[in-house]
Image (spheres, rainbow, N blue to C red):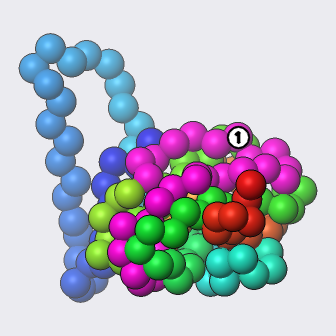
Amino acid sequence: MQLLDPITLPKTDTYTLTLVPPANATGTISVQIYSSSVTASVLADGPAVPVTVPATTAGKRISVTFAGVAGQQVYALNEGTASLGWCTVTLFDPAGKVISPPKSVLVIGAQQLLGPVTLPADGTYTMTLIPPASATGTISVKVLTYPYFR
């Protein structure tokens, strides 16, 4: 589960992440911080775009951007055959606000990754996909709009 939206750090330095659980909480939490992304840009209703997570960047965040229009309904597909395992998928609007909360998707070949989601504004949207640390391979991301996904 993604707990923090992506941020750009202002300078090279040491940063502290503080998690404050409820008073009655017990247990263990594991935290992973990702320092970079594998990025791609797709055209809504265009061809699928291959996105490769090479072994040298295993476990990195995949960021896929696409242009959208207010009121448009979209969904995202993986048309590839790679098995990345359980990934966390989130959609951000042009202002960086989460509009489709993080959800776990088992990426084991061609399948739906997200949606349908109605876009709230015109602009560039970012879908992030966070694979397990050991995941490598290539997925082919395609974004479709209504009525193409009916």
Among the 4 quarters of the image, the one containing residue 51: bottom right
Q: Main secondary structure of the magenta part?
A: strand
The image quadrant where one finds the N terminus is top left
Q: Is residue 87 left or right of residue 101?
A: right
> Helix, strand, or loop for circle 1?
strand
Of residues 47 and 26, the one nearer the viewer is 47
In x, y percent, where is residue 138? 81, 66
Q: Position of residue 61 (x, y in %)?
A: 55, 64
Q: Residue at x 72, y 77 (%)?
A: 45
Q: Quadrant of residue 19?
A: top left
Residue 124: x and y in percent read: 45, 82
Q: Residue furthest right?
A: 81
Above or below residue 67? Residue 64 is above
Asked if residue 81 is positioned above or below residue 62 in the image, the reply reads above
The residue labelled by disc 1 is: 106
At which x and y percent is residue 69? 47, 78
Q: Residue at x 47, y 60 (%)?
A: 118
Which residue shows up at 55% across the image and 63% down it? 73
Query: 14 or 90: nearer the eye?
Result: 90
**Residue 61 appearing in the image:** no
Residue 82 located left or right of residue 106: right
Left or right: 98 as drawn, with respect to 82: left
Could you tell me the amino acid type at mark 1? Leu
Q: Is residue 55 left or right of residue 68?
A: right
- Chain part drawn in magenta: 100-125
Say which residue appears at 29% left-offset and 75% top-offset: 95
